[in-house]
Image: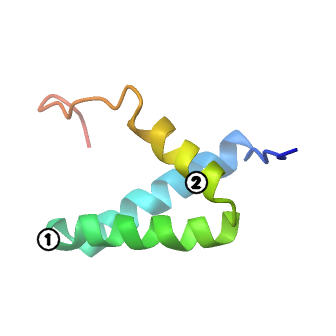
Amino acid sequence: MTTTVSLPPEARDRLYAECARAISEAGAERESLFLARLALLLFEQVGDEARCRAALADALDALPVPSLSATE
């Protein structure tokens, strides 16, 4: 049985903002490398290949197309 731990909405918002800041700091030329490295580090923390694969599939599901009208 797998236990899923959810973050409180406030923590999720803080981590989202920090992640966005870190992506910006990495820069466009290193963004993909940063995200892959972050994912691998988090996969190590999860320690369950099936859950990591499911998270990858969930992240791709209904992934929006970037919009030029999006606000920063």
Does residue 51 sit above or below 44 in this rendering? above
Sequence-first disc among 2 and 1: 1
The amino acid type of the residue labelled 1 equals: Glu
Q: Residue at x 42, y 30 (%)?
A: 61
Q: Quadrant of residue 70?
A: top left
Residue 7, given in percent of the width and then of the height, sits at 73, 47
Q: Are marks 2 and 1 in contact (CB under 8 Å)?
A: no
Q: CA distance from mark 2 to mark 1?
A: 26 Å
Front position in the image: 56 or 10: 56
Instruction: Specify the farthest residue to the right.
Output: 1
**Color encoding of the figure:** rainbow
Q: Secondary structure at mark 1?
A: helix
Does residue 59 sit above or below 26 in this rendering? above
Q: Is residue 27 left or right of residue 45?
A: left
Mark number displayed over residue 54? none
Q: Residue at x 79, y 48 (%)?
A: 5
Q: Is residue 18 left or right of residue 27?
A: right
Dot 2: within a 10 Å radius of its alpha carbon, few (fewer than 14), some, or many (20 or more) residues?
some
Name the residue tied to disc 2: 52
Q: Residue at x 17, y 30 (%)?
A: 67
Query: Which mark is in front, 2 or 1?
Result: 2
Front position in the image: 10 or 7: 7
Q: Is residue 23 left or right of residue 71?
A: right
Q: Is residue 64 left or right of residue 39?
A: left
The amino acid type of the residue labelled 2 equals: Cys
Residue 45, given in percent of the width and then of the height, sits at 67, 70
Does residue 49 sit above or below 37 in this rendering? above
Q: Secondary structure at mark 2?
A: helix
Q: Residue at x 46, y 69 (%)?
A: 38
Name the residue tied to disc 1: 29
Looking at the rendered image, the quarter that the N terminus falls into is top right
Looking at the rendered image, the quarter that the C terminus falls into is top left
